[in-house]
Image (cartoon, rainbow, N blue to C red):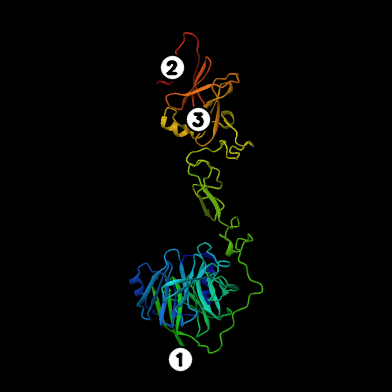
Amino acid sequence: MKHFFVVSLLITAFVATSADAASWPASSIGTSIGGGLMSADAAFEPSGIIWHSGLSQYVVVGDEGQIATMNADGSVVTMWNLGGLYDLEDVTVADMSSSKVYLLDENTSSAFEFDLTIGALTGKSWSFADKLSEVSGAGAEGLAWANGSFYVGWQYDGDIYVYSATLETSGSQSFVQEIHMTSGYTDISGLAYNSDTQQLYALYDGLNLIEERDLQGTLLASYSVPGSNQEGVTLVTTCSSSTATIVIAEDSGSVMSYSGYPITCSSSTPEPTPTPDPTPVIVDIDADGIEAANDCNDNDATVSVNQTYYLDSDGDTLGSDTTTSVCSVSPPNGYVANSNDTNDSISNYGIEISGDGADNDGDGIVDEVNTLSSNGVHPYYGTLDPKSKTLKISSIISMVGTKNGDILVTYTDKSIYQYDALSLTTKASSNVRSVSGTAYYVVWFGRYSAVVNGYTGAIVSTVTFTKGNIHPLKWVQETLGL
């Protein structure tokens, strides 16, 4: 069970509990029968329990996927573990002559059929996710079977949801009714139905309270409950003495047995399955038009479904294809709301990327060539050392000369920059050559020549060669200090 606190509601509930709930009617000191569970698995946190009268054994489940059968004295008979994918919160039995039990999984808001004889799931399941889901960590916590229906307790609002179902057919559930429990009560943590008394027993962890109700939802009695972290409840009845042993599973690891719990056994036919409410109440705390069962955060009207955000490894506000889904209007740290980055290992926000069909720099033109006047220096390549041959190989795809002494540089993120190297007026293309494999380039046209930083377009030096002046190679070496 995931801890769930709604302070204002719990304050109201505690006041109502102290005023209306009777004192605990069974033995004041319980007997611990959970030692066998803890010896078999020290990590076992009992979250649900049922007395299987056909086997004369308890069936106990834990919220890490454990299932165990144990004798009346607490000695463990068998234990299985479905693994951490399951958060088992309660268990119920439909037929005491059968080895089939039904497990409530909070992760999926579903009941799964489990066969104790073979120690495995049968493949049948029934989903309650149309009405119950985890809201702020509060999900499906209680499960009981009675008269052809699953009764499911929702921790979030403390109510019981009734689904008719055919156990022979997987997925045959149909919502019938929401039983509205005591106003202000939340944190329902366990649920049981006893066929001898024909009553439901609803356990409230945060309130230390148990309520007895008939199948129509009428409140019959409520008692304060000893202990803490109460997660599951079941009764072993003795009709001849009008008493029961009531057993409460606590997720601290304890299973406590209390004798002398008063009951009234019924010989009448069980009450019929309740009919649907004519005007079912829709829970929508944040009033955003999405009911709580379908709202990922019913306390925030700005969000109702999980949002997709994209990893931004290079911090340039552009996201990659790596996604995460969260219930938030703002992205988690390191993520953004777009997936526009063509290379998330370098920062290239605001730079037009050739061939991607997108207006990356927001100027209304798609896939154009970048210039220093329109886009500035590339935010990543403009910071690199042009003397490094290794960086040049991994950064620049090509550099070619064009008309008017200009050059076009294509970087490995597919962006293209045009730089003015010689400031000429000519339709013929200039010549370009890398200097010793670095990102420095010599650009020349006729007698005119320049050394250019291929990362920034900066002109390092220019010269007009005439007969008898400096030799071109010596000029380059002196310019770059090579």
Residue sitting at x 66%, y 72%: 279
Residue sitting at x 50%, y 38%: 347
Label annotation for residue 240 = 1
**Residue to which mark 2 is pinned:** 473
Location of residue 35 in the rendering, given as x and y in whole percent from the top left corner: 34, 74
Question: Is residue 389 placed above or below 62 in the rendered structure?
Answer: above
Location of residue 308 in the rendering, given as x and y in whole percent from the top left corner: 55, 52
Question: Is residue 37 placed above or below 266 in the rendered structure?
Answer: above
Q: Earlier in the sequence, mark 2 or mark 3?
A: 3
The one of 426 and 296 positioned closer to us in this rendering: 426
**Residue to which mark 3 is pinned:** 398
The one of 9 and 433 positioned closer to us in this rendering: 433
Q: CA distance from mark 2 to mark 3?
A: 22 Å
Q: Secondary structure at mark 1?
A: helix
Q: CA distance from mark 2 to mark 1?
A: 113 Å
User: What amino acid is labelled 3 in the image?
Assistant: Ser
Q: Quadrant of residue 353?
A: top right
The one of 351 and 185 positioned closer to us in this rendering: 351
User: What amino acid is labelled 2 in the image?
Assistant: Leu
Q: Quadrant of residue 291?
A: bottom right
